[in-house]
Amino acid sequence: MADLRELYQELILDHSKKPRNYREMPNANRRVEGFNPLCGDHFTVYMDMEGETVKDVSFQGSGCALSKASASMMTQALKGKTKTDAEALFERFHDLVTGKAGEAQAESLGKLAVFSGVSDFPVRVKCASLAWHAMKAAIEGDAEQVSTE
Amino acid sequence: MSALNHVSLEPAGQSRSRVDSGFDVYALREDFPILKQLVHGKKLVYLDNAATTQKPRPVIDALACFYCADCSNIHRGVHALSERATQEYENTREIVRDFINAERLTEVILVRGTTEAINLVASTYGRKNFTEGDEIIISAMEHHSNIVPWQIVCEQTGAKLRVIPINDRGELVMEEYEKLLGPKTTFVAVTQMSNALGTINPVREIIEKAHAWNALVMVDGAQGIAHLGVDVRELDADFYAFSGHKIYGPTGVGVLYGKEKLLEDMPPYQGGGDMIRSVTFEKTLYAKLPAKFEAGTPNISGGIGLGAAIKYVTQVGLENIAAHEAALLERATEAVQQIPGVKLIGTAEKKASVLSFTLEQAHPHDIGTILDQEGVAIRTGHHCAQPVMQRFGVPATARASFALYNTFEEVDALTSALHKVHEVFA
């Protein structure tokens, strides 16, 4: 059960039950749906980009605790970041959940480091990274729907 | 649930699920080598049987025997190995014919599985016979494999797809079915038993009503075959399909049953070796049934393994299996309902072997991960039945499904693992 506690840390459970920035954003200038057809997880990520900067970001949808908490914490981490920062964060987060991040890199992710346990559950990587893929597509402005399959 | 009368329902620990016939689940488990393993340090509790069943020793041995002793191509060789392999493979056709009570061997087409069988009928019978304005009826509880092939053929022919709705318990609304039937109805495709809900459909009645309108009926037996069995003649089914791997056989082999007259009139599905009588560049004459629908080298070892699987099931006795599974389902249904936040999806009066549910506090995937850590294997997701999920307004469910080798202790392991989920997410 040690692994499980590592996976479902308090912070993750808290964000899954009370997701932050969980709302539609009518004035969003970027909007991408993230969809996992295998499991049915489905999120919409809304972004308000001002030039190269993420002015606001929110999300809505349904999915498991991991996907929801990850989306919620992602929105908190992104506000005010530049496009380049956001892309770099995506890479670092992806390394974290796929077990490629070193300790220093994990620490540099701050609160997001709670997702390090995901790397022990390879089938759940897609859950944890779904909203992130949608976010990446949104800032790059090249898709309206992304799929993790 | 009269079958329950034959099964003892003592508490787990001392109980032996014995039916009068001598059904002994613990003895039977010895036939399934895979069940002996630990998963994450816990005893494996395999409750994903609606996805695929585990294979008993005689099936594994049949596969190994083929590759150790008889491996060769069938139907063509004159040498001893090919003769033996052909005999074994064709022997399965007879075992299947007997098991489903088909009249003739020509009515038993060996295919890759249920999906291929349905696609075969849709793209040969359907493409030849459906025309603009025809109506094809399916139901709201179908697996994607009994939806999409019909959508494709409807697109190609201009036929229209109509859907029998289901009620809140997950049962077909038969009055609505009768309303859908009419002179435009040409074909009905319906499952014998729902993989997502466990519902057993009144297939006999469905067929009778369709035949009254001269419509043909294809029954998807993927789930039904291992729990209910089938008598295609008694049902008067026009087509019936099932997969080997859901009845303790290998993957990649399955059966299409079709009435001979219908199969005769259908064009071939795939062209190639084995399905021809003679080939010239001017004209090719097709082989007789069943070879006409069996182009190319088939899954020979799989076919032989399927024969071994059906023999095994017949020896254990389908009625004994059904009675045992009914007892497991009843125990699981009662126990799972004690967990706070549980909602059962699929509460049909007639159901078998499938317990689909959601937990208010935890998404099915999280349930699946936590159960896996306890050694309990269940399925989570939409079960390839997205319209069913939409009908019940859930994105996914957790599904435990039972087979002949499951025990009451395993049902208890499921329940206590679910209590752990509740602890984590409460």
Image (tube, coloured by chain):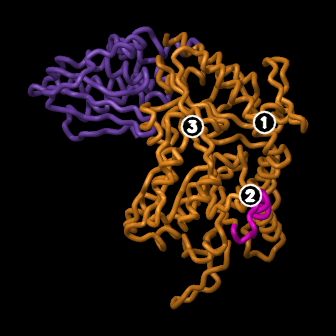
Chain colours: A purple, B orange
Query: Foreground residue, B144 or B337?
Result: B337
The picture places residue B219, in percent across and down from the top left corner, at 60, 56
Q: Which residue is mark 1?
A: B3
The picture places residue B403, in percent across and down from the top left corner, at 72, 37
Q: What subunit carries mark 3?
A: B
Q: Which residue is mark 3?
A: B197
Confirm whether circles 3 and 2 share one chain. yes
Name the quadrant of the C terminus of chain A. Answer: top left
Q: Earlier in the sequence, mark 1 or mark 3?
A: 1
Q: Are marks 1 and 3 in contact (CB under 8 Å)?
A: no
Q: Residue furthest left?
A: A51
Q: CA distance from mark 1 to mark 3?
A: 20 Å
At x 33%, y 16%, the residue is A19
Which range of residues does the magenta coloring cover? B92-107
Q: What subunit carries mark 2?
A: B
Q: What subunit carries mark 1?
A: B
Q: Amino acid at mark 1?
A: Ala
